[in-house]
Image (cartoon, rainbow, N blue to C red):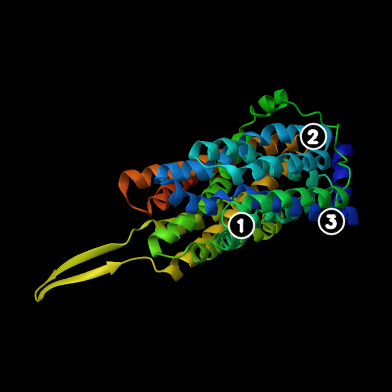
Amino acid sequence: MSTQQGNLGRAGDTQAIPLRAWSVLAASTLAFMVCFVVWMMFGVLGVQLRTDLGLNSTQFGLLTSTPVLTGALMRLPLGTWTDRFGGRIVMTVLLVVCAIPVYIVSYATQLWQFLFIGLFLGCVGASFAVGTPYVARFFPPKRRGLAMGVFGAGTCGAAVNLFVTPLLLSAYGWRFVPRVYAIALLVTAVIFWFASAPDPGAGKRGGSMLDAFKVLRDPRVWRLCQYYSITFGGFTALSLWIPQYLKSEYGMSLVMASAFAAGFSLPGSVLRALGGALSDRFGAHAVTWWGLWVAWIALFLLSYPATDFVIHTIDGTASLNLAMPVAGFVALTFVLGAVFAFGMASTFKYVADDFPDNMGVVTGIVGLAGGLGGFLLPILFGVLLDLLRVRTTCFMFLYGVVWVSLILIYLSEVRRTPVVG
């Protein structure tokens, strides 16, 4: 960076943030939240559809994760289009176009139809790659961590889905749900257009697919992909998986299971703003590193399945039962959701700081990695459950992934960089 650019950056850090920036942030967060509600709706609808269609665990995992796949794949092109055409235009078009497949879901009757339509519906998940660079351009570097955290709190759509979708489903049937959400997308598009502002970076950064291949040469991009595939991928996968887990493991109704599942999704969403502020204060690396350690401990405790021990004593046999109570499960998943939120926010603090001139492209690449994690994990959860017949295998698998990732982060960063801000 040149001296002139550095001076401009420092001056920008001290400037008062205009009202227009906050309006853009609010409108973008609303749009992202509504998109996330739609993106996650199969996590609740899928529980009912699993019964109606007679799906096994692997098929259920495929059903819930199919929209996540296209949401991941579309992040890269939408990120480059945001650099070229501006976030205001791209986000509005995305909201309007995606309302069509969402509405068509209400007419599906077979698994292949849900999977096919889900591929198009999943494009709403790419809204994050649009909003992140768009919002960041309205804020100075030292406030971007907070701005990214507030915008990222739009993932509270996962919790909104867990509260609203079961109520709509119980009252009016599952086919009513996608129709309501299609209308919600259109209304949100109108609100977003009038509450947002033209993108100051539109047409100035000319992102392209070639740019994406160029930035892939930077090892920092691969490390960010690794972090986000764990934090966002794990958050997305568990948001889709936990409702049916609670229903099966604890015999809850769908409404109650979804409400308890919000204990994971809600902190995993609203605490992203706090994660962004912590990243501004202590640095993105410290927040990511220590957050993964907390996640590793929580996943270790969640991994242990319900077990009966038979103990032979001098007076005969005694039995000991070990099982995770509902309160313990909710508490641990709350902690897990919180540290995933911190990790998601800290990852994009990295992006904003390290790649200010290629934010759209890098956001798309990193978002793609996170989305692919969110796509693959539910399928793997289903396969493991069908093979091993132990419900906690989903947490066992994540425990192993986080442990390997901690080792890799230590080897690549911790030995070279201070772990405190």
Query: Which one is closest to the eye, mark 1 or mark 2?
Result: 1
Q: Amino acid at mark 1?
A: Asn
Which picture quadrant has residue 290? bottom right
Sequence order check, earlier mark of 3 and 1? 3
To which residue does mark 3 refer? 22
Please, what secondary structure does the residue beneath circle 2 have? helix
To which residue does mark 1 refer? 161
Q: Amino acid at mark 2?
A: Asp
Sequence order check, earlier mark of 1 and 2? 2
Sequence order check, earlier mark of 2 and 3? 3
Q: Is residue 129 left or right of residue 394?
A: right
> Is 311 or 189 nearer to us in this picture?
189
> Is 83 or 70 nearer to us in this picture?
70
Marks 2 and 3: CB-CB under 8 Å?
no
Q: Is residue 387 left or right of residue 332?
A: left
To which residue does mark 2 refer? 83
Q: Is residue 34 above or below residue 412?
A: below
Q: Quadrant of the C terminus?
A: bottom right
Q: Position of residue 402 (x, y in %)?
A: 47, 48
> Is 89 or 336 nearer to us in this picture?
89
